[in-house]
Image (cartoon, helix red, strand yellow):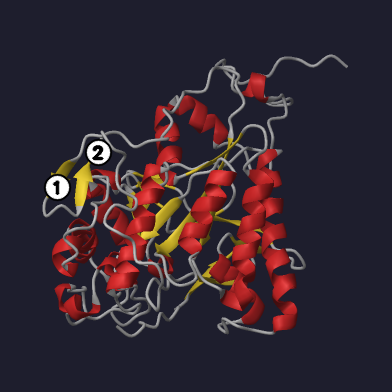
Amino acid sequence: MAATQRIAVGAVVTAACAASLAGCATGSSGSKEGVSGPQQGAPAPGSVVRLIGDGSTAYTGSQPHLPSPERLKPGEKPPQFVVFSWDGAGEDSQKLFSHFRKVSKENHATMTYFLSGVYLLPEEKRDLYKPPQHSPGSSDIGFNDERGIADTLRQVRLAWLEGNEIGTHFNGHFCGPDGGVGTWSVEEWKSEIAQAKQFVKNWKTNTGMKRSSPLPFDYDKELIGGRTPCLEGQKNFRKAARQLGLRYDSSGVDDQVWPEKKDGLWDLSMQLVPFPGHTYEQLTMDYNFMVNQSGTQTQGDPDMFDYWGDQMRDGLIKGFYRAYDGNRAPLVIGNHFESWNGGTYMRAIDEVVREVCNKPEVRCVSFRQLADWLDAQNPETLRRLRTLEVGEAPRQGWASFLSGRPAPAPKGVPGAPAVKQ
C-alpha cells in the first residue's frame, strides 16, 4: 500500500508573552521494514492470558515494572517527577518509537505514548471511522497500512510490558473552526473516545491479522487519559472524560506549579519554560519550539538545525532545574515522532532524558504513575505544595514546610509571634 502522508496542523495558543502554536500529531504510516512476527512482543511464557473480544487485547495480569505509589512522610521532600509524552505514537520507517523505548530503558525512565486509534485502522477500512461533524472515512492524519499497523502493535506491546503507559490522541486529528475538536459537544467527544477504544480493541478483525499476538492489556482499564489534537476542545472533552471514568487530561498550558484536579480530572498540562534568547517562555513541546523557530516550515534553514535543537534542550533543562531546585513541581514534556528540522528536536529530547533521569530524587514516569502518586498523597500536602510559586523552594526548608504541623504565620502579619529586635 502506498504511504499515507501526515500533515501537521497548529492551533494558536497565547500564554505569557508568547504566541505559540499547539502541536499536532503525525505519522505512523509509510514504507516500513521488518514486519513483526506473531510472537514478537507477546506476553512472557507462563503468564496468565485471557483474551478479550476478538483477541486483539488480553488480560495478562498486573502491568510489569509499575511501582506502587507511596505517600510522602511528614517533612519528606517530594521527588522531582518528569513526564515525557508522545502525541500520536506510532512506528514508521524512522523507528523513533523503538528508539525512545531503548532510551527509556537505558535511563531508568518510563513514558506515556498517546496512540492515535486510526493508526491501527487500515486504509481500506477507513469508512469504519465516523468522526463527529465529518463524513465517514475522513481523517486529517490519514490511516495506516498492514506493515505500519504490525510495527506499531509490536512497539505498543513491548512498551506496555516495560512499564510505559498507552494513552490516546484520539483519531482523525481535526483542528480549527470547521468541524475541529474545539467545536465538538460532550456527546461527540464520547463517540470519538469510544471509537479510539474500538480501533485498539478490534484491530484483528479490521486487519485480518488473526495470528498476531494480542496487546497484553485490557484497554478499557489501561486508558485513563489523553491529549486533545492541537490542545483544542478541552472543556467538553473533560466533561466526557469524567463521565467515562478517565482520570487525567494533558491538553492544557500551565506554569511550572503543582497540578490540581479540574472537572474531576487531574490537570497534567504541559508547561511554560525559559526560551533561551527570548524574553518570553515557551511551551514544553517540540512543535511549539519549531513554530517559533522556523514557522510552519518543518524543514527550515539547515544551518540553524543544531542551534534550534540546543535551544529546545537548554530551555527544557532550565525548566527542569527551576523545579528541581525550587518547588519540585512535575515537569511535563510533549513530543511527536517526527524529524522536523533535520531531527534536531529528537536529538534534544535524547539529551534531556540522559541529563535529568539519572539524577538523585528524580523519577521519569508516565502520566499514570504521576496520577497514582498524586492520588496517594494527603490532600493537605498537595494543598501546601500548590502554594509554592514557579521556582520557589520553601523558605523554611522542606522538613518544616511539609512537617504536618500548621505553617507559622509570616512575619509582620497580625497574630504572628512578636519578633525580638
Q: Amino acid at mark 1?
A: Ile
Tell me the residue at 60%/71% (across/down).
Answer: 343
The residue pinned by badge 1 equals 52
Q: Quadrant of the N terminus?
A: bottom left
In the rendered image, which quarter is residue 358 located in? top right
User: Which one is nearer the viewer's eye here, 125 or 239?
Assistant: 125
The residue pinned by badge 2 equals 60
User: Which one is nearer the viewer's eye here, 231 or 157?
Assistant: 157
User: Which one is nearer the viewer's eye here, 336 or 23?
Assistant: 336
Disc 1 element: strand
First in sequence: mark 1 vs mark 2: 1
Left or right: 358, with 261 as reference point: right
Q: Quadrant of the C terminus?
A: top right
Left or right: 16, with 245 as reference point: right
Q: Position of residue 152 (x, y in %)?
A: 35, 62
CA gap between label 1 and label 2 equals: 10 Å
In the rendered image, which quarter is residue 48 located in? top left
Q: Amino acid at mark 2?
A: Thr
As displayed, is residue 409 above or below residue 66?
A: above
Q: Position of residue 187 (x, y in %)?
A: 18, 62
Left or right: 39, with 353 as reference point: left
User: Which one is nearer the viewer's eye here, 134 or 403?
Assistant: 134
Q: Position of residue 230 (x, y in %)?
A: 43, 70
As displayed, is residue 368 above or below residue 112?
A: above
As displayed, is residue 80 above or below residue 286?
A: above
